[in-house]
Image: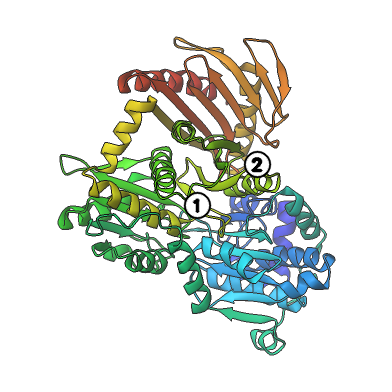
Amino acid sequence: MDYMKVYEEWLNNDYFDEETREELRGLKGNTKEIEDRFYRSLEFGTAGLRGKIAAGTNRMNKYIIAQVTQGLANFIVENGKEAMNRGVAIAYDCRHYSDLFAKTAALVLAANGIKAYLFEGLRPTPELSYTVRRLNTISGIVVTASHNPRDYNGYKVYWEDGAQILSSIANPITENINNIKDFNEIKLISEEEAKAKGLLVILGKEIDDEYIEKVKSLSLREDIDKDINIVYTPLNGTGNVPVRRVLSERGFKNIYVVPEQENPDPDFTTVGYPNPEDVKAFKYAESLGKKVNAELLIATDPDCDRLAIMVKDNNGEYLAFNGNQTGAILIKYIVEGMKDTGNLPKNPFIVKSVVTGDLGKAIAAKYGVETYDALTGFKNICGKANELERDSKGKFIFGYEESIGYVAGDFVKDKDGVISSMLLCEAAAYYKSIGKTLIDVLNEVYEEFGYYRENLISLVLEGIEGQGRIARMMKVYREEFPKVLGDAKLTKYVDLEIGKVWDLVSGEEKDSDIPKSDVLKFYLDDGSWYAVRPSGTEPKIKIYMYSKGKTLEESQNKLKVMEEVIMGKLHSVQ
């Protein structure tokens, strides 16, 4: 793409409003910024779109939203009148321009004769997944950048099963987007006309009520201590109303909300990077927790599909649990709760991502619950669950990934911070009723199943140069990966890009049963393993390391050696 030519087209085309063109005029002479904004179009894929908010083809703005929605609309029209009539449900989060982008998408769909169901205000991403299934729409859209910094926004597309689209749907949508050669091809009507034609329907309380009732139906126990003190922060996002409501209706009496992070704030003034996976996001929650003597701190990300926790220790300080640890606690609580109440289904199974640890798998196996792997992302986790159920392999009871995403039940086909919040608070309250904290429970799990430790390192490499270096790192590591890490030797490795598994002990080579993706995974003879992959939504290369030892010290030492060897190799690639 000739980025300067495209820049000039945007600059001189009166299709774009004066505000946009004024912003672009301000870039004159800044060749590097112009290149970054126009050297490509934001790539649409199974993760939808995500990027910085600004004018340009490589940025999030109302014109790119309209173009992508027109591509989606063209694909839906190709699927026939029934698909058009079923329509598309649309939700949005608290970020800058989310409401504008959501309405723009709705009006493009309506202009194409496709019914749009638009929420009246902010809603959590998982409620959109529920709504797609509840209203039997052909598709769904969420305008959100999840936990990215404040200058980002995004656009995620769901299909009729309530899960994010897989490549079989994303590819033809992308083809339709690419076939739009001129912005004048995009159809748009006014809100008044869309409503008059019955093509724009506003959603509100009725869907909220049904969704909350469904969440509460997943409750496992009443013999819990509902007086437990809990601090909650929605990090200025969409979780404030639904999470507080479901906890209140479940009878929790002492829920304290961080006041500075209670209401929507697109600038995330008190937190900066609104990712609850980063312990710094808990600064205000910890302060409040000490004032109210909270036993548990919980945080959801801005679109409320992810959950993180901290638990008070014996010294009155708060210990952060990572996604693998929280997942293990939830698995133990859910499986044991189902078993104790006689609700564990026949042939139950769990699905986790390929880069999620094996502690939860070990707990599940104790109770005869099978664990399956899927590619990263809940579109793949829920897709795998749907596939297994279609093939009569059992009943899905839980899905999770190390990046603090969890779901239970079958009415949401995505990670769900509302469901996770309720079940996690319920678990903490149950264990408190038998004299244990979540730290006690986790330590008991380690004693029984071994000391699992993990580390995730993300190397952020932005821009064209960064993209190139990430590609070189993956290429070099494929060809020159280490065979020995300290005292541990490589026994097996997997390259999902070509779908192959090599057993270095037997010499056997076979096909992987996981769909192809740019992921490398390496298994060591001491039970440890690691994986390397580029992020699908951010300018990062991610390294997931997992060690297993008989003691905490042994497991931690193994992790240090793994980090030194792996990162040394990657950093050598320029």
Residue located at (70% from left, 35% from top): 516
**Secondary structure under badge 1?**
strand
Q: Is residue 546 above or below residue 89?
A: above
Residue located at (76% from left, 57% from top): 173
Identify the amino acid type marked 2: Lys
**Would you call the spot at circle 1 few (<14 residues within 10 Å), some (14-19), or many (20 or more)?**
many
**Would you call the spot at circle 2 few (<14 residues within 10 Å), some (14-19), or many (20 or more)?**
some
Q: Which residue in the rendered view is the most extreme toward the front?
A: 342
Image quadrant of residue 116? bottom right
Residue 124 versus residue 479: which sits nearer the camera?
124
Relative placement, left or right, of 95 versus 199 is: left
**Secondary structure under badge 2?**
loop
Q: Where does the image place residue 224, in percent across and percent down from the top left? A: 28, 54
The residue beneath circle 1 is 408
* First-in-chain label (2 vs 1): 2
* Total tally of numbered discs in the picture: 2
The residue beneath circle 2 is 393
Identify the amino acid type marked 1: Ala
Q: Is residue 386 above or below residue 121?
A: above
Q: CA distance from mark 2 to mark 1?
A: 18 Å
